[in-house]
Image: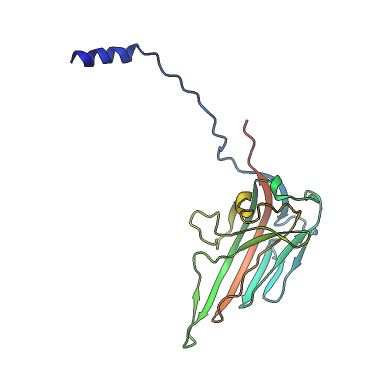
């Protein structure tokens, strides 16, 4: 008992501990947009499309980019851009923290069984994404639309997808070309699968984390 009393007196006599509060730079603030490559409803004369009958690109009535994906062929739709107001001539991935896509992928697949019965299916992850290309058509990086989602599902509702550059450049960390285009390639499905999808893109942005105060 005497020892407990002595220990209690020692603890009371000790000076209060001092703590240094470190500011969390990951403050939850949204990224700072630096280059808006495309935004729904804004002028888009600097954009051009490369597509075919299985992946037709166009502008929807509300100004969004729309890509209709149909059939059972491999597709390679491409959105290219040239320098314009707010879009510099030299865009290099290492100069930015994020690529942000505001988009959704509507639709599903039609699957025919051996008896010819057709059912509609939509897996949570459709393994559909984008690839960035340089001025020579070389791949600079890629990611799946499901990668930054909390549930790892390909979004069918309009969603703001924030892709860290480290994720996009994971397999191509040494590539430092000038970005000129974003493509949405999709390999050929199984012969009994037909695609009926619509990719809607509202915004394509390059952004940075906000600087700490």
Residue 191's quadrant in the figure? bottom right
Determine whether, in the image, residue 120 is placed left or right of residue 188.
Answer: left
Q: Is residue 9 above or below residue 144?
A: above
Place of residue 177 in the rendered image (x, y in percent of width and height, measured from the top left): 75, 54
Its colouring scheme is rainbow
- Of residues 45 and 150, which is closer to you in this image? 150
Residue 208's quadrant in the figure? top right
Seen at 64% across and 35% down, the residue is: 211
Determine whether, in the image, residue 196 is placed left or right of residue 57.
Answer: left
Q: Quadrant of the N terminus?
A: top left
Place of residue 104 in the rendered image (x, y in percent of width and height, measured from the top left): 59, 61
Q: Is residue 9 above or below residue 78?
A: above
Give the mark count.
Answer: 0
Determine whether, in the image, residue 100 is placed left or right of residue 2.
Answer: right
Seen at 81% across and 53% down, the residue is: 83
What residue occupies the far front of the structure in this picture? 174
Q: Quadrant of the C terminus?
A: top right
Place of residue 140 in the rendered image (x, y in percent of width and height, measured from the top left): 69, 57
Seen at 72% across and 67% down, the residue is: 58
Seen at 68% across and 69% down, the residue is: 76
Place of residue 107 in the rendered image (x, y in percent of width and height, measured from the top left): 56, 70
Determine whether, in the image, residue 13 is placed left or right of residue 110.
Answer: left
Q: Is residue 211 above or below residue 73?
A: above
- Of residues 120 and 79, which is closer to you in this image? 79
What residue occupies the far bottom of the structure in this picture? 115
């Amino acid at each position: 008992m005497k020892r407990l009393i002595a220990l209690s007196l020692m603890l009371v006599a000790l000076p209060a501990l001092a703590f240094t509060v470190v500011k969390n730079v990951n403050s939850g603030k949204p990224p700072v947009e630096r280059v808006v490559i495309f935004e729904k409803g804004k002028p888009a004369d600097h954009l051009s499309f490369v597509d075919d009958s299985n992946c037709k690109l166009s502008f929807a009535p509300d100004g969004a980019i729309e890509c209709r994906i149909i059939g059972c062929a491999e597709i390679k739709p491409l959105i290219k851009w040239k320098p314009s107001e707010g879009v510099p001539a030299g865009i290099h991935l290492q100069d930015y923290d994020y690529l942000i896509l505001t988009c959704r992928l509507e639709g599903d697949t039609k699957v025919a069984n051996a008896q010819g019965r057709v059912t509609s299916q939509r897996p949570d992850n459709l393994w559909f994404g984008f690839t960035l290309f340089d001025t020579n058509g070389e791949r600079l990086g890629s990611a799946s639309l499901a990668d930054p989602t909390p549930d790892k599902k390909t979004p069918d509702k309009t969603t703001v997808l924030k892709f860290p550059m480290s994720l996009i450049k994971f397999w191509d960390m040494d590539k430092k070309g000038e970005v000129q285009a974003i493509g949405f390639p999709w390999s050929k499905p199984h012969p009994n699968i037909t695609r009926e999808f619509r990719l809607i893109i509202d915004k394509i942005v390059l952004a940075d984390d906000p600087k700490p105060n």
